[in-house]
Amino acid sequence: MRTVTGEVTGNLAGEQRGLEPQLAAAEFRHERLCAAMASIAHDLKSPLGVVAGYTDLLLTERIGLISSRQRSVLEQMQQQGQRLQLLVEDFLTLGALEAGTMQCRFAMGDIGTSLQEMCALWEPRFRERGIALYHVRNASLPPFPLDNNKVQRVVSNLLENATKYVPAGGSVTVQAELYRWERRRANPEPGREFDATQLAENERRRRHFEGPNAVRVRVTDNGPGIAAEYHLEIFDEFFRLPEASQTADGTGLGLSIARRLIHACGGKIWVESELGAGCNFHFLLPVQTPGGKTDSGLRSRPSPL
């Protein structure tokens, strides 16, 4: 029996060694692809910014009056330029995440102000599409360490997603609240039981910290909803719902980037939805940063669930 087991183990080890060069080559190609994608996106960012600036200048009529037809053309250029800028930002962010160079910088901040700023930024787009956007401000939320830029990027991606699927006459609500986050603990290794003393210590700590330990942000809409079988897949790169694959704008990266940014901040994101009943996107932010550090560079890492 030992001889057979040894032969099987040896064969598996040999096969693994044979796959290592292929794995290394695949990783190298992946790194080069990410670097090329980031380089292209970076090269596009500057000229797009110049075009956007000149378009805005023409619309102000500071350098000359324009006709109604010219204004219509310029406004379309402005909208498409903004769309391209969002795509470039998605590729730049994805490239940084893939390369492992994305860092979180936590500083004491007000999540209510952060959400209010993003709602004010997106309100004109919602108004153009006939969608009502509401921000329910919670004055009881205390300041806590957060990476404001990344949180606002996540909210922006969720709001952009809502503009694609919520029909005219619909509504989107953004709100935040204190939340008790019960994190799942890992199962023991096969053949090994939990230590009773450790379990008792974990229970003691849980009872000691019964209060809220996170902030939950919700972005709720009354759109068409998402079937349960897609609740996980929608956070994958380039994934599109089958019924929207031919009509929705974008690259399919928005929710994936939101998930990875939230995980980098030590949080969690998910969706609750049913077909015909709208969507309720949630994400959690711990009120204490990983390691308890603020205003410091922390390398992105997955969040414990």
Image (cartoon, grey):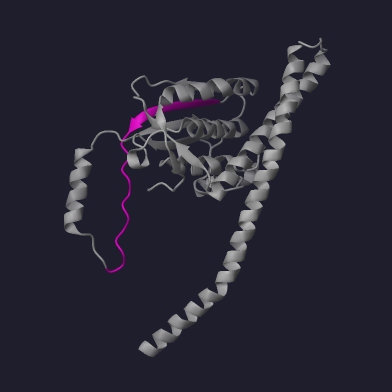
Which is more toward the observer, 121 or 169?
121
Q: Is residue 51 left or right of residue 31?
A: right
Query: Residue 281, image x and y in percent?
Result: 47, 36
Q: Residue sitting at 62 percent across and 56 percent down?
A: 30
Q: Residue sitting at 61 percent across and 63 percent down?
A: 26
Which is more toward the observer, 60 or 290?
290
Say above or below: 10 vs 209. below
**Quarter of the figure with residue 257:** top right
Residue 1 visible in the picture: no
Say above or below: 2 vs 148. below
**Quarter of the figure with residue 129:** top right
Residue sitting at the far front: 296
Which is more toward the observer, 112 or 134?
112
Q: Which residues are magenta?
A: 171-191
Query: Residue 225, image x and y in percent?
Result: 53, 38
Query: Residue 299, image x and y in percent?
Result: 46, 45
Q: Residue sitting at 35 percent across and 24 percent down?
A: 141
**Quarter of the figure with residue 146:** top left
